[in-house]
Image (cartoon, rainbow, N blue to C red):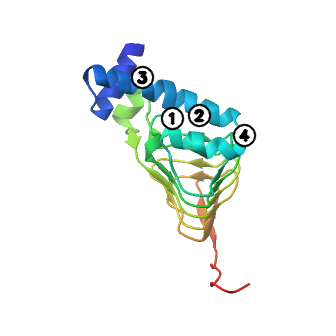
Amino acid sequence: MLIATLKEAMRARGWGGLSGWFKVFYLYLFRAYFWPLCAEHCPTNLTPFFRRLQGVKIGRNVFIDRSVILDGIYPELITVGDDARLAPGSIVYCHSKAGKLLSESYLPDVVAPVKIGDSAFVGLHVVVMPGVTIGKGAVVVSGSVVFTNVPEFCVASGNPAKVIRRLRPKEPGTT
C-alpha cells in the first residue's frame, strides 16, 4: 500500500527511477513532515523561515502563526505576499483528492496554486481551497471557507466566503 502510494506520487509529478525515489522521500519526510514540524514548534518569528524551506514562496514581513496548516504535498504552489498575515488555525490547501469512487464520478482531483496578496489578512480558522487568489489588502473573516477569489481591498466572510464590504485604500500622504 505504501509503495503504491509513493509510486502514484512519483507518477503524478513525472518523476522516475532512483532519483524519483529520492525526491519523493524528501517530499514526504522533509517537506511534508519535518519542516512543518519545526515551524510548529519554533518561535513564531522563525515560522516563515521553515515554511520557505518547505517550499512556500513567502514575501517580506509576513506573519504566519505556528498553528497554520499549509499544504504539505504541494507547498511550492503557495505564494504569500509581503506584509500578509495568517492567523492561528488557518488552513491553505493546493490539492483535493477524493477516494476512487467519488473521484471517478463526482469530484475530480484538483491541484491548483493559491496566492495570498500583499498586506492580506486571513483570520482565525479560515480554510482556503485550491486555486484561490486572495487579493492585495483583502481581509478574510474568521471561520470562513474560501472557494472563490477575493478581490483586492475587500472583506469576505462566510461559508462559502462572499464579499461583504469593499475597502477604500488610503491615498499616499493622508492620515
Q: CA distance from mark 1 to mark 2?
A: 8 Å
Q: CA distance from mark 4 to mark 3?
A: 27 Å
In this figure, which residue is indicated by the disc labeled 2? 36
What type is the residue that disc 2 sits on?
Pro
In this figure, which residue is indicated by the disc labeled 3? 25
In this figure, which residue is indicated by the disc labeled 4? 43
Q: Earlier in the sequence, mark 1 or mark 4?
A: 4
In the foreground, 141 or 35: 35
Q: Earlier in the sequence, mark 1 or mark 2?
A: 2
- Name the mark nearer the viewer: 3 or 1: 3
Residue 72's label in the rendered image is: 1
Q: Residue at x 39, y 25 (%)?
A: 24
Q: CA distance from mark 3 to mark 2?
A: 15 Å
- Name the mark nearer the viewer: 1 or 2: 2
Q: Where is the N terminus found, in terms of image quarters?
A: top left
Q: Residue at x 63, y 79 (%)?
A: 168
Q: Residue at x 42, y 15 (%)?
A: 2
In the foreground, 28 or 138: 28
Position in image of residue 90 (x %, y %): 64, 45
Q: CA distance from mark 2 to mark 4?
A: 13 Å
